[in-house]
Image (cartoon, helix red, strand yellow):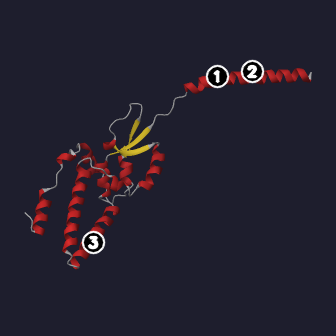
Amino acid sequence: MRSTNKTIISATVAVALLLTALITPQVLAQKKTPALKIGAYDSRIVTFAWSRSDFFKQHMIKLKQQNDSAQKAHDTAMIKELSILQMTFQHLLHQMVFSNGSAGMVMTLVNDKLPDLAKKEGVSVILSKWELDFSDPSIEIVDLTNQVAQLFQPKEDISRSAGEISKQPPVPIDELGMEADMMDLYCERFGKK
């Protein structure tokens, strides 16, 4: 009797294992692999948010302190260098807000917050939408502009301005030259024509 029970149990286990082996690949084949999700943001709006934050305020304070020190020391070479840096910074800022210039220098300030945002939003990658040249239609693109902008904790409500920015296509970066007023001011300050 025990031998018969062992045989029945062994046969039942063998049949169960055989069925599991035959059915499992079919069931797994029917499972759909989750689509890759990419988080994209409008770098113009993110840069605008940064320009309304304490991060930007600290950057401007640092520039002013450097300028004040150079003025106080009558260091004309440093004053000239800082003037060039300020004009360059202003031009870069215009490229980032009005065109599709890289927001890389801005994003380094919140890089440590991006993994948590990616996890929360279920995305594998976060990048500027202007850096995404192509994606397969099976890849889901999630707009994270507002979430990324809020990482900078802007000191004012930027939603109205962000809406206006998003309605406008970026000015082609090769059409966004140095402003004549900046050049004139530089030439006037340093006696150039």
Q: Quadrant of residue 57?
A: bottom left
| Disc 2 target residue | 15
x and y percentages locating residue 13 in the rendered image: 77, 24
Q: Look at label 1 and name its amino acid.
A: Ile
Q: Look at label 2 and name its amino acid.
A: Val
Horizontal side of 22 relative to 96 (left or right) equals right
Vertical comparison of 175 with 59: above or below: above
Label 2: few (<14), some or many (≥20) within 10 Å?
A: few
x and y percentages locating residue 1 in the rendered image: 92, 21
What residue occupies the far right of the structure in this picture?
A: 1
For label 3, the SS is helix
Q: Quadrant of residue 130?
A: top left
| Disc 1 target residue | 23
Q: Look at label 3 and name its amino acid.
A: Gln
| Disc 3 target residue | 66
Q: Reading the chain from its start, which is encountered first: label 2 or label 3?
A: 2
Q: Reading the chain from its start, which is encountered first: label 2 or label 1?
A: 2
Q: Nearer the viewer, mark 3 or mark 1?
A: 3
For label 1, the SS is helix
Label 1: few (<14), some or many (≥20) within 10 Å?
A: few
Vertical comparison of 78 with 42: above or below: below
Q: Kindly indicate whether the residue at mark 1 contacts the one at mark 2 (C-beta within 8 angstroms).
A: no
x and y percentages locating residue 126 in the rendered image: 40, 45
For label 2, the SS is helix
Q: Residue 14 versus residue 148: which sits nearer the camera?
A: 14
Residue that appears at 42% across and 54% down: 111
Vertical comparison of 159 with 187: above or below: above
Horizontal side of 63 relative to 109 (left or right) equals left
Horizontal side of 13 relative to 140 (left or right) equals right
